[in-house]
Image (cartoon, rainbow, N blue to C red):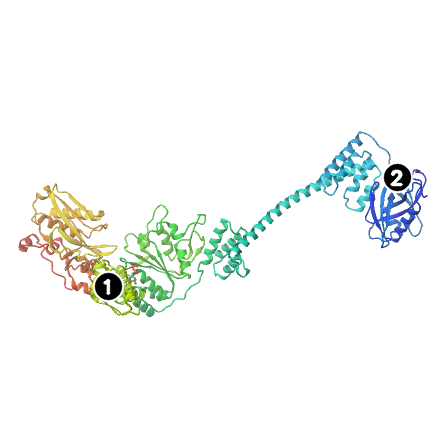
Amino acid sequence: MFFNRDDKKEAAVLPMLPLRDIVLFPHEVRPLYVGREKSIAALKEAMAKKGADGKAWLLLAAQKKAKTNDPAPDELFQFATLGQVVQLLPLPDGTVKVLVEGVARARISRFVPHDPFFLCEFERVVEEPTKGVELEALIRAVQATFKAYVELNKRIAPELQQQVATIDDPSRLSDTIAIHLPFKSVSDKQAMLELESPVKRLEKLYELMQGEIEILKAEKRIKSRVKKQMERTQREYFLNEQMQAIQRELGDKDDGGKSELQELDDKLKAKKMPKEAQLKVKKEIKKLKMMGPMSAEATVVRNYIDWVLSLPWGEETKDKLDITEAEGVLNADHYGLKKVKERILEYLAVQQLVGKMKGPILCFVGPPGVGKTSLGRSIARSLGRKFVRIALGGVRDEAEIRGHRRTYIGAMPGKIVQSLKKAESSNPVILLDEIDKMSSDFRGDPSSALLEVLDPEQNHTFNDHYLDLDYDLSKVMFICTANSLHTIPQPLQDRMEVIRLAGYTEEEKLAIARRYLVPKQKEANGLADVEVKLTDLSIRTVIRRYTREAGVRNLERELAGVFRKLARESLKNGKSAVMVDRKRVMKLLGTPKVPQDKKEKTNQVGIVNGLAVTDAGGEVLVAEATTMPGKGKLVVTGMLRDMMKESGQAAVTYVRSKAKRLGIDDKFFEQNDMHIHFPGGVSKDGNSAGVTMTTALVSAITRIPVRCDVAMTGEITLRGRVGAIGGLKEKCLAAHRLGIKTVLVPRENKKDLREIPKKVRKALRIVLVDYVDEVLREALVLEKPADFAKLLPEGGAAPVPM
Ligand code: ADP
C-alpha cells in the first residue's frame, strides 16, 4: 500500500503515468492508449499494488512537451491528478487500452528513483469547503452560462447540461464543466487544473464560457451569412447551367466552345477604332459580362456593342482616280445629259486634285425620273466606291438623322449611321434622296442635323445620339437630289452645288428607251435570248399615250409591262421572234392613260395656254376666264397660292387701266364680275401666269378668241411690261410635247434660250416679248387686225431668229 487516501499527513508514493497532450481533471473518465514501455510498467505496478478498496491508484501528470518520449522529471508538470484505473485491456499489439478516472488534484513533491517507471511522492490537494450567497450566485450564473453554451455548441450532448444543473458542489461543478470546455493549449488546461480554489475556478470558467459564447454566436452569424451567399451563388450557377442546357437543346450551340463575349473581345481587337470608341466598347463589354445574359438590360448593352462593332471604322475602299474612266461609266449609264456629265466630271476632277472631299455638295434638282438617283449610283461606280441611298422623303424628326439617345426604349442610330453599316466602308457615296421633301415639326428640325452632316468643318466628328461617339464623315461623298429648290432651307442650299436636270424631249426619251430601258427590261423579264423588235412608233406611242412626265420613270414602268406580257406569251407560244408595232403596244398595254392631246384644238374666247413648272416638270396649264353681271369683282380659283392670286389682281388692274385702248367700255367693270379658273387638281404658285391671265381676261371681255396653238409665260407689271420667269427649258419642252406652235417668252429670258434642245428650238416659234400688247397681238385672233393695231401703239413683235 503506497498511501492512505484518507490520511493527509502521510506522504504517499504512487506510480506515475506521463500524459502527452492531455490534462486529466478530477471526475473525468477517459480512455488512454498506452504504448510506452515505461508507462505500461507503471500501469502494471499500479494494478499489482491495488489498494485496500480493491482499486488500482496512480498519478497522472501532463508532459510539458508532447513530443518528448522519455520525459525527465523537470519535463513534467508537478501538479498532477490522482486517478484510478477503471478498466484495463491489453491489446494484441502489446499496447494497453486503459480507462482512468480522475479523483483529486495532487502535488508531486518528489520523484523517487525507480526503474523502469516513475514513482512519485505526492500530496493530495484538499480544498477548503466554502459556502455563501455569493458562491450560490456564482454557481447559478455558471450553470446558466453553461446552459447557453451547450445550446450554442452542438458538440456537447444536451443531457450533460441537465446533469450539470444538478451539481451543487462547486469543486465538482467546476471540474465537470472544465472537462467539456475547449482550452487553447495544454498549458491553459494545466493552469485550470492548478487553480486550487473552486471559486476561482468557477470564475475563470464563467469568463471562459462567456468568451466562447461570443465566439459561437459570431460563428453562427458568419455561418448563416455564408450559407445564404452560397445558396444564392449556387442558385445562380444552377439556373445558368440550366439555361445553357436549354440553349443547347434549342440548337444555339456555342461553336468551338468560344463564348460570345470572347468573340466580342476578339472583334473589338480586330477593329481599327479611335481610342475613345475602343475604351467605351471595352467598358460596355465589361458591363455585359457582369449581367445575366437574358436580362433586358443586357440586350440593350449587347445591341449597342453590336452596332458599334458593325460599323466600318477607317475601313475604306480605294478610289479609282481616272477621269476618262469616270466619263466612260457616266456615258455607259446615261444618255444625253451632256452638260450635267461635264459638271460632274469637273467636280470629280477638282476633288481629285485637292485630294479631299471638301467643298460644296452636289445636288441634282429636277423632276422625277430624269436619272438623278441613277447618276449618283454611276458616280459611285466610276469612283469604285460603295453606294447607299437615304430616302429623306417624309423625314420630320431630327432623331431619324441623328438617332435616339440610348435611354429611349428601342433606341436606334440614325439614318446616316445605318447607311454606313450598310455600306461597310467609311468612304461610300451617300445619296440623300428627295432632300426637299424633308419637313420639320416639334420633334426637331432634321435639316439642322443634315447641315452638320454636310459641313466639312464639322462632319469629321459627327456625333450620333445613339452611339454617342464621334464618327468621321469627312471621307464620305454626299450627293443630294431634289425636285425643286424652294423648300430646301437656305443654309442647306448654300452648301450645295446645284445641277439642274430639266427633263427629256420625246426624241431623247426615245433614244433612252432604245439604248437603255428596252435592253434592261428585256433582260429583266427573261427575254434576253428572244429577238424583240420595237418600232419607233410603238415606243413613241408609249411615250405619248401612256406617260405624261418629264422623266422616263413611267416610260420604264410601261415598257416593263410590255415585256412582262411578251414573256407570258413566249411561254405559251415558244421563244420565237416578236415584232411590236403601235397596234401591238396598244393591245398589250390596254386603254391609253393619257388623252391624246390636252391642248385646245379650236380657238376659243377666254381660254389660254399657260406654261408652268411643277414637281413633275414643265406643263401646259390652261386658264379659263369668263365674265358675268356683277360689280367688277374678280374671283381666281384652281388651288392657287397667294402669289398667283396677286398676279390675277395685277392682271385686272392692268386691263382696267388700259380699257380704253383695248376698246372696252368704261362701264363694263361697274356692271360685270370676272372669274379666272385653272382646271386641274395640283396646287399652283408663282407669278409666271401674269400674261396668261391678262390675255384670258382681255379675250373674255372683248369676246375675241385666243389662238389654241399659242402658249405663253411671263410676269406682268401694272404698266404692262412682261418680266422674266424660271424654268424656261421645262416649259418649252412641255409646249413641244403638246404640239404648241408658238411660245411667247419674256425678252429678259433670252439668255436661257440656249438651254433648250436644238430640236425643240427649231420646232417651236419662240417669240420674245417686252409688253403685254405684243402678247395680245400674237395670241388673239384679230378679225380686223388693222383696227386692233390702232390700239396697240407699241407695234408688233418680230419672231426671234434662231
Ligand atoms: P430620279 O432619281 O431622277 O427620280 P431615277 O434615277 O430613278 O430618277 O431614274 C429612273 C430610271 O430612268 C432609271 O432606271 C434610270 O436609269 C433611267 N434613266 C433616267 N435618265 C436616264 C438617261 N439619261 N439615260 C439612261 N437612263 C436613264
Q: Residue 249 appears at what percent x and percent y?
A: 53, 55
Q: Say few, some or many: other residues with alpha carbon within 10 Å of mark 1 (under 14 / 14 to 19 / 20 or more).
A: many
| Residue pointed to by mark 2 | 125
* Residue 214 position (above or below residue 404): above
Query: Which residue occupies 66% across, 42% down?
Result: 221
Q: Residue 93 appears at what percent x and percent y?
A: 85, 55
| Residue pointed to by mark 1 | 509
Query: Which residue occupies 66% across, 44% down?
Result: 223
Q: Amino acid at mark 2?
A: Val
Query: How far is disc 2 from disc 1 in space, using C-alphas?
Result: 133 Å
Q: Say few, some or many: other residues with alpha carbon within 10 Å of mark 2 (under 14 / 14 to 19 / 20 or more).
A: some
Tell me which corner region of the image, top left, top right, bottom left or bottom right, holds residue 101. top right
Q: Describe residue 511's horizontal placement relative to residue 163 as left or right.
A: left
Tell me which corner region of the image, top left, top right, bottom left or bottom right, holds residue 727. bottom left
**In the rendered structure, which disc, 2 or 1, sits on the residue that comes first in sequence?**
2
Q: Ligand 1 quadrant? A: bottom left
Q: Which mark is residue 461?
A: none
Q: Amino acid at mark 1?
A: Lys
Report whether the residue tagged 1 is closer than 8 Å to ligand 1: no
Name the one closer to the observer, 298 or 208: 298
Q: Residue 689 appears at what percent x and percent y?
A: 18, 52
Q: Name the image quarter holding the C terminus.
A: bottom left
Query: Which residue occupies 84% across, 46% down?
Result: 99
Q: Residue 482 appears at what percent x and percent y?
A: 30, 56
* Residue 725 position (above or below residue 141): below
Provide the secondary structure element on which disc 1 rests: helix
Report whether the residue tagged 2 is closer than 8 Å to ligand 1: no
Q: Name the image quarter holding the N terminus.
A: top right
Provide the secondary structure element on which disc 2 rests: loop
